[in-house]
Image: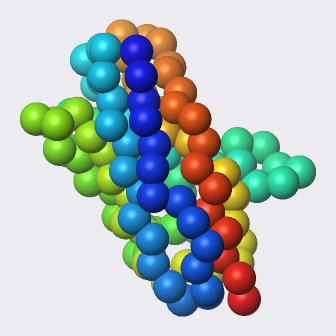
Amino acid sequence: VQLQASGGGSVQAGGSLRLSCAASGRIFTTLGWYRQAPGKQRELVAAITSGGSTNYADSVKGRFTISRDNAKNTVYLQMNSLKAEDTAVYYCNGGSYGRDYWGQGTLVTVSS
């Protein structure tokens, strides 16, 4: 099982980034993104089911968009209007038959 995340980087406040995560090895009913800022707990950012239902953290609604290509088993997170408080390590997550799988983190740094 592998979840390969990419797309992190540094951007100024107000800018945009797009994260990608290619999943393999399992059928993932849910794919999503979590983030962990220094000194804080890991939190859900957004998730999407194989049927296209989405769930967002209140703090990112209207700014972030999660999407999924089921044929490629890939999930994307389009992040617009980034804020300094979005700075964190972002982790790709896949849910498969009651188990959670994690990819390596990708760092997003937003400077104000």
Specify whether 8 is left or right of 6: right
Which residue corresponds to the image point at 38% horizontal and 42% vertical from the top-left? Answer: 21
Q: Position of residue 13 (x, y in %)?
A: 61, 87
Total count of labels: 0
Specify whether 62 is left or right of 54: right
Above/below status of 105 relative to 24 = below
Specify whether 2 is left or right of 14: left
**Residue with the most extreme left position:** 71
Above/below status of 8 relative to 49 = below
Above/below status of 12 relative to 26 = below
Specify whether 94 is left or right of 52: right
Asked which colour scheme the image uses, the reply is rainbow
Which residue corresponds to the image point at 52% horizontal and 31% vertical from the top-left? Answer: 103
Q: Is residue 58 visible to us here?
A: no
Q: Position of residue 60 (x, y in %)?
A: 52, 67
Name the image quarter holding the C terminus: bottom right
Q: Position of residue 102 (x, y in %)?
A: 53, 27
Which residue corresponds to the image point at 45% horizontal and 43% vertical from the top-left? Answer: 5
Q: Position of residue 98 (x, y in %)?
A: 43, 12
The answer to which of 51 and 67 lies nearer the viewer is 67
Q: Quadrant of residue 69?
A: top left
